[in-house]
Image (tube, grey):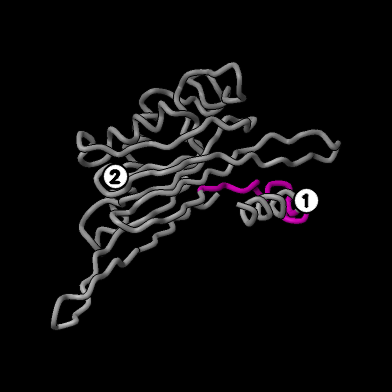
């Protein structure tokens, strides 16, 4: 799957006293597909066997650490031209668990000042979830909720997939609502997957 980065720049402005000039403050919100960010430990509750040292992809600690460092570099560069700072809020998909998110946050600039994490484990068969990272000094979460996507396979059995995450909060003084979602893939062909993606769109619209 080709990596996609979506960058949104929020322009928050106020009028200056008598001159009535508009002053803008740029805030950066990003979304990034980290493509199978798994740790190296085999979790018996999900199908992550391929992403272990002895698995198909020989997922070693060295390769894991390099992936973490590479992702951190990419995230840090988003929005640099506009405001010379890493994003205020980052939506992520294809993360395995909270631990990989903690490792990623520790590699981001000013880790001591802190990025917060919003994450819920989803019922996805491969164990991949969506998540939200946010600068604690820029964004204040007010509410967060996961929404389950119910889809069925060709045998009319439940096809377990990732949840959609909704977070509201204050980006400085502006109230915003964010939906982080990762729709079912087109593997097997667009026609075959269309029904699942329509269901994801319907849930998105309902939210």
Q: Can you say whether 13 is above or below 49 in the image?
A: below
Q: Residue tagged by mark 1?
A: 192
Q: Find residue 79 and report its horizontal and vertical position in percent.
A: 29, 59
Q: Find residue 172 and report its horizontal and vertical position in percent.
A: 28, 54
- Comparing 51 with 116, the one in front is 116
* Label pair 1/2, CB-CB below 8 angstroms: no
Find the magenta span and give its range: 180-194
Judged from the image, the secondary structure of the residue bearing numbered disc 1 is helix
- Residue drawn at the location 20% of the way across and 72% of the way down: 23
Q: Residue 205: which numbered mark, if any?
A: none
- Choose top left, top right, bottom left or bottom right for residue 159: top right
Left or right: where 160 falls relative to 104: right
- Residue drawn at the location 63% of the way across and 30% of the way down: 123
- Give the mark toward the camera: 1 or 2: 2
- Residue drawn at the location 33% of the way across and 48% of the way down: 75
Q: Can you say whether 35 is above or below 28 in the image?
A: above
- Comparing 123 with 80, the one in front is 123
Circle 2 crowding by C-alpha within 10 Å: few under 14, some 14–19, many from 20? many
Q: Residue 135: which numbered mark, if any?
A: 2
Q: Residue furthest left?
A: 18
Q: Find residue 190 and report its horizontal and vertical position in percent.
A: 72, 55
Prevalent SS, magenta region: loop
Marks 1 and 2, how far apart at CA: 39 Å
């Amino acid at each position: 799957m080709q990596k996609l980065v979506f960058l949104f720049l929020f322009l928050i402005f106020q009028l200056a006293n008598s001159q009535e000039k508009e002053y803008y403050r740029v805030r950066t919100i990003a979304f990034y597909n980290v493509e199978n960010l798994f740790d190296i430990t085999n979790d018996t509750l999900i199908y992550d066997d391929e992403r272990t040292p002895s698995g198909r992809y020989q997922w070693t600690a060295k390769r894991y650490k390099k992936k973490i460092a590479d992702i951190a570099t990419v995230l840090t560069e988003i929005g640099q031209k506009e405001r010379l700072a890493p994003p205020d809020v980052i939506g992520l998909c294809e993360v395995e668990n909270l631990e990989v998110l903690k490792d990623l946050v520790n590699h981001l600039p000013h880790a001591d000042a802190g990025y917060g994490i919003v994450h819920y484990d989803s019922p996805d068969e491969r164990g991949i979830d969506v998540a939200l990272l946010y600068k604690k000094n820029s964004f204040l979460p007010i509410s967060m909720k996961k929404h389950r996507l119910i889809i069925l396979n060709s045998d009319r059995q439940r096809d377990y997939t990732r949840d959609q995450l909704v977070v509201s909060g204050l980006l400085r003084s502006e109230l915003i609502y964010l939906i982080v979602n990762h729709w079912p893939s087109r593997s097997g062909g667009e026609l075959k997957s269309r029904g699942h993606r329509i269901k994801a769109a319907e849930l998105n619209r309902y939210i």
